[in-house]
Image: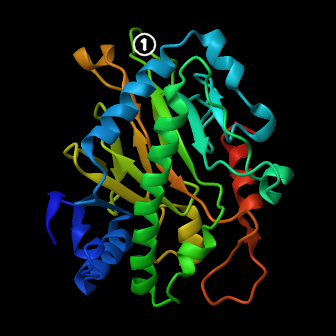
Amino acid sequence: MATLHPTIPVVDFRDWADGRMSPKFVQDLGDGLSKFGFVAVTGHGVAPWILDRAYDTARRTFALPDGVKKQYETPEDGRQRGYTSFGVEHAKDNPAPDLKEFWHVGRTLAQDHPLHVSGDIPPNQFPAELPAFQEVFSDYFNRIEGFALSLLDALAQYLGVQSGFFRNMTDDGNSIVRIIHYPALNEPPPAGSVRAAQHEDINLMTVLPASTAEGLELMTNDGEWMAVTTPPDVLVVDTGDMMKLLTEGVLPATTHRVVNPSGDAMGKERLSMPFFLHPHPDFRLKPLGSTDDGVTTRDFLHERLRAIGVA
């Protein structure tokens, strides 16, 4: 298995998506996530112009006046859609605020869809001041979700579960793109605050294109922090707490963080656009094969949203 870094496995998606459905791809993907919680994926088919367009739109979005952005905040739904102001969110068990602002975009449902009516899938908040935002990030969401679902199909094979098991559980799931802006640090940050304090992802799987600046670190199995630096044409994939629960830790949720820059880099902003894949709100999370009732994805998510200060 090739590596971009001594401990981050790299897999080539073409070995799966081009009709090959290579058993080696399945094994390398599953083993990489099982051992490290993170893998890097090449050959994913997401064209550079897609990412360039999205990052350009993100820059223009966060350059809007604070008063405009705040019109799109939705604390009433746990900030699952729209804008979240700088310094609102903090990591679980860490009261110091993260040094970021962000915007959530999810799937758009019909007005009479039961999950729209119930509020489980809140409506998107598209800024009228940037008409391109809706098209750009709806397209980005659909492309990255399609890629993520293909990876889930490979993981179903790896884990020996029924074909389509993971894909089917995500039908109408509350998946989101989180468009994150970490402003330049032109003065010392508050004590204890970093761009994103150490945490594990809540969801099933995360897909992360290369950010516009370095800073991502993951904790190795030896308890050491390791910088994750990848070329711009690589997608980083990790598994979250929901997958850890389903697989009883076979596919773990690895602790990671985004550290503050130093030196000249302090004057540079950082943009990131992770995609968080979630099951359907009614899906009951429990170990594979278990007869327990488990907990609904809805309840699991809301508990974690409260723990990080956004609900």
Residue type at tag 1: Pro
- Is residue 173 placed above or below 289 in the rendered structure? above
Q: Position of residue 286 (x, y in %)?
A: 67, 77
The residue at the point 31 percent across, 77 percent down is 31
**Residue position marked by numbered label 1 in the rendering:** 188
Please provide percent x and percent y for residue 91. Answer: 58, 40
Quarter of the figure with residue 17: bottom left
Q: In which quadrant will I find the N terminus?
A: bottom left
Quarter the C terminus occupies: top right
Residue shown at 16%/62% (left/top)? 3
Q: Is residue 58 left or right of residue 108?
A: left
Q: Position of residue 260 (x, y in %)?
A: 37, 27
Q: Where is 152 relative to 115, above or below?
A: below
Which of 88 and 164 lies nearest the eye of the viewer?
Answer: 164
Secondary structure of the residue carrying tag 1 is: loop
Residue pictured at 60% horizontal, 35% vertical: 90
Q: Is residue 243 above or below residue 214?
A: below
Neighbour tally class for label 1: few under 14, some 14-19, many 20 plus, Cα within 10 Å:
few
